[in-house]
Amino acid sequence: MKRLVVLMLLCATPAWADGTINTLSPGGALTGPELIPMFQTANPASTTTPAALDTYLAATTKTLTNKTLTAPIMTAPVLGTIASGVATGLTGLPLTTGVTGLLPVANGGTGTATPSLVAGSNVTVTGTWPNQTVASTGGGGGTITVTAGGGTSTGVSTVAFGNGLTVPSGSSGTAAVTLTNTTNSQSGASYTLLTTDASKTVWMTNVAATTVTVLAAATAGAGYAVAVVCDAGCTIARSGSDTLNGAATSITLAGHQLAYIQGDGTSAYRVNIAAATPGTIASGTSALGTSAIASATCASVVTTAATGTATTDVVTASFNGDPTAVTGYIPLVAGMLTIVSYPTANNVNFKVCNNTSSSITPGAITLNWRVAR
């Protein structure tokens, strides 16, 4: 008969370190060689999983001392006072509550806890930082020293340019000073120069000769200068006992002749007269008469306006067509009519004269004329 031998193996339950793990309460401290604390349940074997470990850690508060954490993610931690560290990668740091100390000028700050504006020349500062008011007490940007024409003005705030110099209108940018000449046109029978005529050209547009009297040299001041030109000629007369060109009391200008007059600021003027330049003063046409002209007489003068003409000018004239077929101007043995031309102030004049022994009734004819100087 066979014997049934039953080998009974006794399986021992695992030992948990020193046994204290079985009685460890949540949040309790381990003693002995245990390495991993476990969340204690009725069945210790069922608690040795990551999920059980997470549950345990979430239910407790842990204290880390001298631990190295690699890229940890902390949700709403209260860090308290940090002894040291590098905050290069931090963002969202509030300036009102998260920063202490003074922000230096190099980083956009003032470098001081009590910034303040400082008053300067022609500038006042009132109030306290940051509510300070800046006001100007000067004359628009400081003072200027100007030296010109032998004189100097110091401490002026505005420079005014006289006749002959102009600047563009505007309030900013660069203003270029330009040398100009302004014309003062006059048409009266006479004119006396004024201080405001300095560096101007006084142009007398009269149809007849006129008189221009200079301003007293002492009143005009040193450096006073003016140009004078007269369409019909004029006389430059002195003021009081002042002299012109050393001793003269007056100087005569021909029509359109220009004089440059400069005073010495005391009692004398130098008058430089430009030579008259030949040219046409006036030109036009004149129709001659057709009434009978008795022998050895002249017809009534035909006068035509020629503005600017002086008695010293030259009048030239020619027919505007062939005259040899016009009665009175046909070449004959008995002779033909003769035309006499001459200038008067601002006019040209023509007379038709009969040098023959008989009366002649001339045909219609027109002259083209020109006044030259």
Image: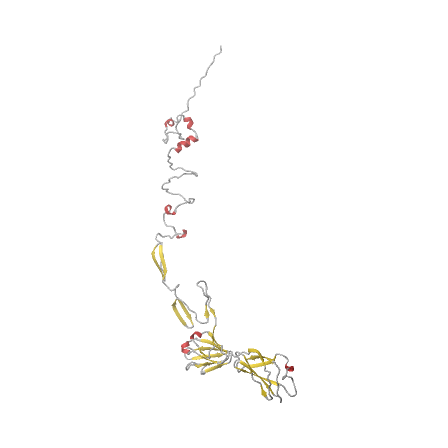
On screen, residue 101 above or below 354: above
Q: Judge left or right: residue 207 versus residue 329.
A: left
Q: Position of residue 153 (x, y in %)?
A: 39, 70
> Observer-nearest residue: 302 or 47?
302
> Observer-nearest residue: 119 or 308?
308
Q: Judge left or right: residue 350 versus residue 97.
A: right
On screen, residue 120 above or below 326: above
Query: Which image quarter: residue 10?
Result: top left
Q: Residue drawn 36% across and 57% down?
A: 133
Q: Judge left or right: residue 282 versus residue 222.
A: right
Residue 152 in view here? yes
> Observer-nearest residue: 206 or 367?
367
Q: Position of residue 108 (x, y in %)?
A: 40, 52
Residue that extends furthest to the left in the rendered view of this protein: 127
> Observer-nearest residue: 295 or 33?
295
Residue 279 in view here? no
Q: Position of residue 131 (x, y in %)?
A: 35, 55
Give the colour scheme of this rendering: secondary structure
Quadrant placement of the C terminus: bottom right
